[in-house]
Image (cartoon, grey):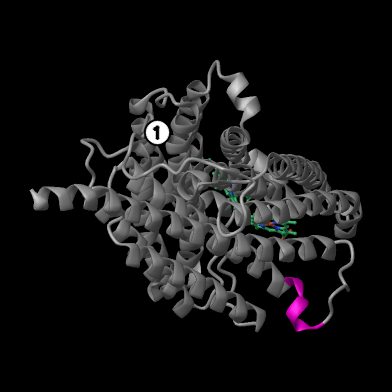
Amino acid sequence: MSRTLSTTTQQPQQKDKDARALAAMLAAYSVSATFWLLFATGVGILLAFKFGAPDFGAGPWLTFGRLRPIHTNATFYGWASIALVGLANYVAARSSRTPMYSVKLAWSGLVLFNLAAAIGTIALGLGHNDGNLEYREWPWPIRLVFLAALVVTAWNLIGTVARRSTDDIYLSNWYTIGGVLWTCIVALVAILPWYQYGLGQVSVSGYYMHNAVGMWFTPLALGIFYYALPRLLSRPIYSYALGVFAFWTNLVFYPIIGAHHFLFSPLPWWLQTTAIVFSVAMLVPVWGGSANFLLTMRGRVRDLTHSYPLMFILVGVIGYLVGSTQGTVEAFRSLQEVWHLTNFTVGHSHLTMYGFVTFAIWGGVYALLPLATGKEPGRLGLMLHFWMAVVGSFIYVISLSIGGTIQGLDWKNGLPFIQSVVDMQEYYVWRGVGGALMFLSHIVFAWNVWRMTYGRAARVAPIAALPAGEAAA
Ligand code: HEM
Ligand code: HEM
């Protein structure tokens, strides 16, 4: 009798402890990622204004060559990676209706991710750069620390899903575990020394760059959509089978398209053509996945207009659909002739990494963090964040898309290079204006995150105990 009593009182206590551990983990990942967002986009603003005032910020620390990789690496590996991993850990536990496999591993991952981002930033600031290898400019020992963080994360996610109390592995976990495992391979290939010279290096660079975005950020962001959308709408995802189909086609087509970054280079012509063909094939998972999300939202316009988390997710889905379709079009040789190396590509990078990945993270954080901590941000904060980020990124992407096209046509028509600089001037100013709005929205986001975690909440939300009723997941 006394044994039965102690188990029944212990069980809710244990569940409560697990739920608190999960909430603390998600809060710490979110706060830490937000710090990197503020830092990295502060640097982004500085970079943007350097186009108009190149002499601003003299001295080696503030040169464009040092600040640019600091911005790209800190947004990729500080902001997006840390935020996505926090959400992936949370989703794995909740959708598998089990506690995290190891709370300690989750915290170790956070420490390692932060360590890599901090030392990487300092190294780049001091001028220690691994060269022309885009998105892997951190000296290689630092990239090993990032790899260690990935391995720890993969271990924990697999462990959590293996302990699930559900029959199936929920779709989100296919995407996140697939993404983490693939990225361990990609990160390793990027470090191995015997590919790092000549044409092999070019090929590996394309492979690395595109798999970083396609097999890391993309699947983790899609994993958030598959979990948060059903939760917010209290209805299941439109088609589970379509989600699985999109997963496998993504896995088959994405790894082969990296060479489209190096069209017209000395890489074999057949390799470039293969990359173009599979860039077109990417329409299958992109349109399949986007249709699945949009059909899940069908007929729920009222919910959408009343819920900022849903609005963030809707923008993220549109960013995924439009940005990736734009990527397919961009891969054709006839259009690469105009757009390659122009600011049009920078517009594409931000349409995807910002309009898709960053909005997906925001949707996920606003949907899930209040469930974990029981604290909600105020509606004014949500509104300001949403509209400033939407309007700012719209101005950013549109100005660079138009300006980049003019720039490319100037080059193609053989005009003096300086003419393209003059023609770009006003578009650079508009990019700065859009960027300033985006940055302001990040300050509001930081305030909202604070209120959802350690600060005083605007509203109290119900804490969902673990592993109680997962709506539609
Ligand atoms: C799936 C369909 C996609 C295709 C076919 C595609 C295609 C392309 C192409 C052809 C370029 C090279 C442009 C050039 O150098 O002239 C490019 C660049 C880029 N794409 Fe995509 N893209 C796709 C989706 C995405 C997504 C979802 C993301 C982000 C999550 C992304 C992020 C980037 C970035 C950051 C660059 C700039 C790379 C650099 O610095 O050179 N793309 N993309
Ligand atoms: C306030 C917001 C932001 C501003 C003002 C900004 C500004 C900039 C600037 C000026 C560049 C250099 C472009 C060039 O070399 O011509 C750049 C590059 C880049 N930024 Fe941002 N950025 C912002 C947010 C972000 C975020 C949140 C991400 C990722 C999650 C991101 C990812 C990138 C990437 C991938 C590139 C390289 C683009 C390429 O080579 O095609 N940025 N950004």
* Residue 130 shows in this picture: no
Residue 14, image x and y in percent? 27, 54
Q: Is residue 344 left or right of residue 202?
A: right
* Residue 153 shows in this picture: yes
Q: Is residue 273 magenta?
A: no
Instruction: In the displayed orientation, state which residue is furthest to the front.
Output: 2
Q: Main secondary structure of the magenta part?
A: helix
Instruction: In the displayed orientation, state which residue is furthest to the top.
Output: 299
Amino acid type of the residue that numbered disc 1 sits on in the rendered structure: Ala
Residue 149, image x and y in percent? 40, 67
Q: Over which residues does the magenta segment extend?
A: 59-64
Q: Is residue 398 left or right of residue 287?
A: right
Element class at badge 1: helix
**Residue named by callout 1:** 246
User: Which residue occupies 80% across, 48% down?
Assistant: 434
Q: Is residue 71 left or right of residue 18?
A: right
